[in-house]
Structure formats: C-alpha cells, structure tokens
Image (spheres, rainbow, N blue to C red):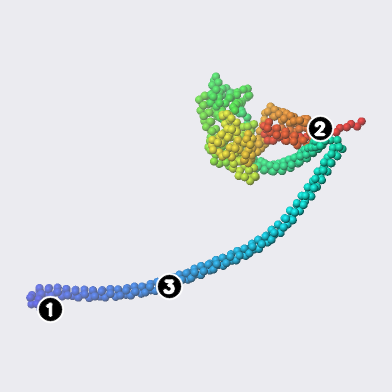
Amino acid sequence: MTLFNTVISALNGGAAAGIAVACAVVGALLGGVIFLIVYRSNASKKIGNANEEAKRIIEEAKLEAKTIRQDGLLEAEEQRKKMRADFEHETKERKQEWQRTEAKLAQRESALEKRQEQQDKKDASLDRKSEELDKAQKQVDETKEKLKAIEEELGGAQQKMQQELERIAAMTKEEAEAELKSALLEDVKKDAAQDAKRIIAETKENATKEAQNIISQAIQRCAADHATENTVSVVSLPNDEMKGRIIGRMGRNIRALESATGVDLIIDDTPDVITLSSFDPVRREVARITLEKLITDGRIHPARIEEMVDKVRREVEASIKEAGEEAAFEVGVHGLHPEVIKILGRLKYRTSYGQNVLKHSIEVASLASIMAAELGIDPKIAKRAGLLHDIGKAVDHELEGTHIQLGVDIAKKYHESNEVIHAIAAHHGDIEPQTIDAVLVQAADAISSARPGARRESLENYVKRIEKLEDIAKSFDGVDQTFAVQAGREIRVMVKPEQVNDEATVFLAKDIAEKLENEMEYPGQIKVNVIREVRSVQYAK
C-alpha cells in the first residue's frame, strides 16, 4: 500500500518527476529482493557444505579413534607377551643357576668325602711306614756295629799286609806310594789325552759341520762382486804431446793441478799415460776425472784447472752420497744419519789389501744377516753393524787412530745403538765379543777377507808371514821340522817320535794354535797339523 500510495502521490505531484522517483524506488526494491534471494541461496549452500564437512571429519575421527584403539590394544598385547617371555626366561635362568649351584655343592661334598678317605689312607700308610722305619733303624744300627768290627779286623790285616809287602819288596811305604803315583799319573795322562782327543774331535766335527752348513748357505746366498785397486791411478793420453800441455809453461799447469787436487802427478817415459799417486782415494779420483775432462776439453791453464777441480769435486761428493745411499738400500739398512751415509759412500774409493772396502762392507752385512737368520735371531743389528764395521777406514787418512776407534767414535757421534758400537769395536778381536751379533760380524768379516781372490799381499809381507809362522811352530820342544803350505793357511809340524808320543801331539797342536792366535795377524784361519812318524829300518845283508 505504501508503494502504491507513493506512486499515486508521485503521479499527483508531477508526472515526470514522479515516474523517475518511482522507477528508482522500484529498482532499489528489486535489487534488494534479488540480493536477498542470492544471499540466502549461497548461505544455504555453505551451510550444506559445512554440514557435509563436519560429517566427514566426524567419520574420520571415529575411524582414527578406532585405529588408535586397535593399535593400543596390539601394543599392550605385545608388551604383555614380552613381559611374560622375560619373566619366563629369568625364571628359567634362575632355575638353571640353582641347579648348577646344587651340582657344585654336591661335587664339593663328594670331593670332601674323597679327600677324607685319602687322608685316612695316608694316615694308615704313615703309621705303617713309621713302623718300617723303626725296624730299618734297628737293622742299620746292627749293621754299623758289624761294619765297625769288620773295619777293625781289616785295619789289622792291612797293617800286617803292608809290613809283609815292605819286607818282600824291600821298599818303604813312601817309596811305594811315589812309584804307584808316578805309574798312575802316567796312565791318567794317557787316558786323559785319549779322552781329550776324542772329545775335541767329536766337538770339532759337530761344530764344524754346523758352522760349515751355516757359512756355506750364507756364502751361497751372498753374491757380492769385488774390485781390486791400487794407491795409484793411470790416465791415458791421446798422444805424447799432451804431456807437454799438461806440464805447461815453466810447469805452471802441473803445479796448479797438484795444488788444487793434493795429488802427485808422475810423468815419465811411459808412452801415452800419466800416473796419479795419493793415499787419499777421493782426492785421487777427483784428480783423475779432472785430468780426463781437461784432456777432452783441450783448454788447460791454471784458471780452467781450478774451475774444473771445483766442479769435479762437487760431482764426486754427489756420487759419494749416492754410493752410500745405494749401499744402505742394497742391504736393507734404514734410518742412517745423512752424515753417516756420506762417510759410508767414501768407502767406494777406499781399498784394503786391494779389496774395495764398500763392497766388502756390503758383503759382510749380507753374510752376517744371513747367518743371523739361520740361527733364528733378528738380523737387523748384525746387518747394520756389518755395513758400518769398517766405516772408520773412510777417515783414517785424515784423523789419528785405528779404523776401529774411528768407527766407534763415528757411531757414537751419530747415536748408533750400543749393540752396533760393540760389534764395530770387537770385529778384529781388540775386545772380547759379548753379543751374538758381534761374533757374527767378526765371522762375516773373516769370511769376506779370506775369500780366495778378495785380497792380495805383497811378496815381502807374504814371505815375512810364512817365516814367522814356521818360527813360532819351531819354538816348541820336540819339534823337528815345520812346513807352511797353502799360502800360509796350513802349518805342518813334524815332531821327534822319541820325545813326543801320540797323546802329546794333541796338546802340542793346541799350544801352537794358541800362540799363533796371540802373536800373529792373518786373514781367515790357519790349520795346525802335527805329524808323528816312527820308522824302523833294517838292512838284509
């Protein structure tokens, strides 16, 4: 009615204005109605969706609650089963422990009963033994009384016998004792010599076999080569004119070369060669290489000589270090001080009786190591001591003292072990070897030195050694003739048969060997062969 009234009023008020107002009012009302309808429709849809979502959530919650309940029941059931199993296992273990305890108690009771029975038996046995001892003591007392009576009878009989013997033999008791002692002493000496001869032969045979076995295996497994050298070096020249160039104007070149190297150059009438002489092998090697390079280069004057000597000296020092490292690597000795390696490398240019000392040291290290392994001991100490045993020879041209003392000083300076130092000090017998390693180094040194061809000796020294060997053997009583054979490695001693019997030859050979050891120095060993020969000669006429 209101709307209608408004329209009527508008119509009454004015046609145009009223229509406009009426249209606006109607539009607004229609829009509101449409909006209300749309809003209610959307609200109904949202409410429906919310109800459906709520139902879905409730269903899911019910399912989840059911699942949780089932899981809880399962877990509770598993926990119950586990607790029951643990309880049953613990009960079973305790039951077994009780059973074991009962068994132990039963065993102890049984053992106690057995011990008691054994103790009863022992008591009974002791009672029987006590009775037997009493009986035995009585028998001993009776036997002592009988023996005392027998001794008294024997004493009287012995006195009567002695008087009768003195009367028959017309000798006093003291004279008879002296004669009897003399005869017994002679027999005892004879038996002792025979026994000593047999024991020494057996001991030597067994020891020699074992030592030969070990040494032969060591030598077979060690294949070290050796080079023999002199104290001089020879440099070949392309022609004799080169001698004049080396000498130089007024001899300035040769003086510069000798001054720079410390080596004497010998230029004589020998064609196409120059001889270098020096007791220091390193200097001689530096001079030899320098001279060869100068000859090849062709430029020979004092400045060039000094330059070349410095260059070659550095090269030789590098080769010395390399030689020391190669030697240590070859025998498997590690951890040497760098200065020890340099000193060891100097042995490459050092010789002893013509034998290269570095090669000799490598061979000694290998032999000592192999023999140590054959004896079942650690070869490291023997190998290290064998390699360093002659290291003092590298500096014996520069410092005072024996090569043994110099080697000991070097080993102490660079903190070598006491075993190595002792082996170095004892390898020539200056002190008594106290360790197996020292003995092995001593033996390996003797083997390497005594090997045929390893060393050479001048004729004069050889003749002196042979004469001294024969003179020592002749100094003993009863010796008729002596013959040194096998280059002094064996001495044959002919004795006078009327002065030396067969048994005394054993002691004579031993005494000669001991005197040779104390008074002579020689490589290897010397065999002492004492020979007693008896000849009976008759002539048929």
Task: Say few, some or many: other residues with alpha carbon within 10 Å of mark 2 (under 14 / 14 to 19 / 20 or more).
Answer: few
* Left or right: 306, with 208 as reference point: left
Q: Is residue 254 above or below residue 41?
A: above
According to the picture, the residue beneath numbered tag 1 turns out to be: 2
Q: Residue furthest right?
A: 541
Residue 443 place in picture, x, y as percent: 65, 38
Quadrant into which the N terminus falls: bottom left
According to the picture, the residue beneath numbered tag 2 turns out to be: 498
Classify mark 1: helix, strand or loop: helix
- Residue depth check, mark 3 versus mark 1: number of the one nearer the observer: 3
Task: Report the amino acid beneath label 1.
Answer: Thr
Task: Say few, some or many: other residues with alpha carbon within 10 Å of mark 3 (under 14 / 14 to 19 / 20 or more).
Answer: few
Alpha-carbon distance for marks 1 and 2?
185 Å
* Left or right: 282, with 461 as reference point: left
Residue pictured at 33% horizontal, 75% vertical: 55
Residue pictured at 32% horizontal, 74% vertical: 54
The residue nearer to you, when weighing 227 against 211, is 211
According to the picture, the residue beneath numbered tag 3 turns out to be: 73
Q: Is residue 443 visible?
A: yes
Classify mark 2: helix, strand or loop: loop
